[in-house]
Image (tube, rainbow, N blue to C red):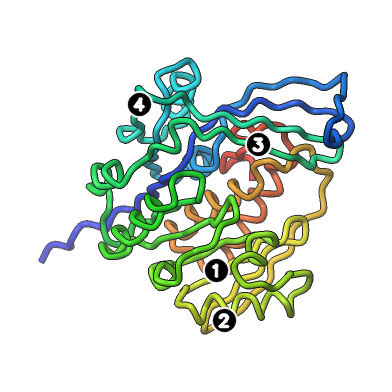
């Protein structure tokens, strides 16, 4: 008797934002009303969705990206970047009514940043656009999604994907409340310290508080909770297990895309059926690499870099 063909590796489907980052690097961040001279200017492709798609693709994941860009030079730059990175971009759509999204980013000498985003075409990614792309959804695939597009589209995509057997990873950034009916659809939720406090009311400063906060989310129906703790590492909890993975101490150059890199790497590790311990270790290593390099997508590592 012949053997059945091996099941292909799960696809990683990223739905989210694409922005162009206009970055100024200076000694310190300006205070309100203050002007600082002498900064270095950089023009980089960014957006949480695009960053996570690039991270996943550069680390070897079969990555499909669903987003909206404007009919402008920034949209053209984004499309070219996706093609060069190996991202499947058949569902990167052009919005003729709105410009591409942009982000204004200030970064200080320690790598800390503050960011203002003009959503542009990202704000017009609709339920109909999700329906058009739902042909991608197959059981055991992975959907990675964030909150930089209209929230009604986010919740709709999560429900549609989960009902088709897709494992949904929600990175709840920028921080926003999640409707209670969405939690049971989530295979994994990946808040940072700011986001976990908004979602649970617990300011997480140690592992005991992380455990309390994670329990609140697990009780709401999330299967796996991963709290990213910046330079400390990441805390994982499910109903069956808990785990803390520390990160290596390094000098940070730019922390802008560390969380996006972590999430993209996590999707790749889970697509490769890694254990949670291995997946978190891999994701922390990737994020650590990213903070040592300038730029958002430019800082994302390849497998060979790790």
Disc 2 target residue: 241
Disc 1 target residue: 276
Image position of 124 (left or right of 74): left
Mark 3 secondary-structure assignment: strand
In front here: 246 or 105?
Answer: 105
| Nearer-N-terminus badge (1/3) | 3
**Pointer 1 with pointer 2, Cβ within 8 A:** yes
Mark 4 secondary-structure assignment: strand
Q: Which label was assigned to residue 61?
A: none
Residue 51 position by quadrant: top right
Q: Where 149 falls versus 172 (above or below)? A: above
Disc 4 target residue: 94
Image coords of residue 5 (percent x, y): 21, 57
In front here: 215 or 242?
Answer: 215
Dot 3: within a 10 Å radius of its alpha carbon, few (fewer than 14), some, or many (20 or more) residues?
few
Q: Which label was assigned to residue 116?
A: 3
| Nearer-N-terminus badge (4/1) | 4
């Amino acid at each position: 008797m012949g053997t059945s063909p091996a099941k292909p590796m799960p696809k990683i489907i990223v739905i989210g934002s694409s922005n162009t980052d206009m970055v100024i690097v200076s000694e310190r961040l300006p205070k309100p009303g203050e002007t600082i001279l002498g900064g270095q200017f950089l023009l980089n492709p960014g957006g949480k969705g695009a960053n996570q798609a690039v991270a996943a693709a550069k680390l070897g994941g079969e990555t499909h990206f669903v987003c909206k860009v404007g009919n402008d030079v920034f949209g053209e730059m984004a499309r070219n970047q996706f093609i060069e990175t190996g991202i499947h971009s058949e569902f990167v759509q052009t919005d003729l009514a709105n410009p591409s999204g942009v982000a204004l980013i200030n970064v200080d000498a320690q790598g800390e940043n503050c960011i203002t985003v003009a959503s542009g075409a990202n704000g017009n990614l609709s339920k109909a656009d999700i329906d058009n792309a739902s042909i991608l959804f197959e059981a055991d695939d992975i959907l990675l999604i964030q909150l930089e597009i209209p929230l009604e589209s986010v919740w709709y995509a999560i429900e549609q994907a989960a009902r088709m057997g897709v494992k949904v990873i929600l990175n709840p950034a920028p921080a926003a409340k999640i409707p209670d009916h969405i939690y049971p659809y989530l295979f994994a939720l990946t808040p940072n310290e700011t986001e976990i406090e908004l979602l649970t009311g617990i300011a997480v400063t140690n592992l005991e508080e992380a455990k309390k906060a994670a329990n609140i989310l697990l009780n709401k129906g999330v299967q796996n909770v991963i709290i990213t703790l910046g330079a400390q590492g990441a805390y994982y909890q499910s109903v069956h297990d808990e785990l803390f993975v520390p990160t290596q101490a390094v000098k940070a150059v730019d922390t802008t895309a560390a969380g996006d890199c972590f999430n993209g790497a996590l999707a790749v590790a889970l697509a490769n059926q890694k254990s949670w311990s291995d997946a978190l270790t891999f994701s922390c290593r990737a994020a650590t690499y990213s903070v040592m390099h300038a730029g958002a997508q430019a800082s994302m590592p390849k497998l060979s870099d790790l």
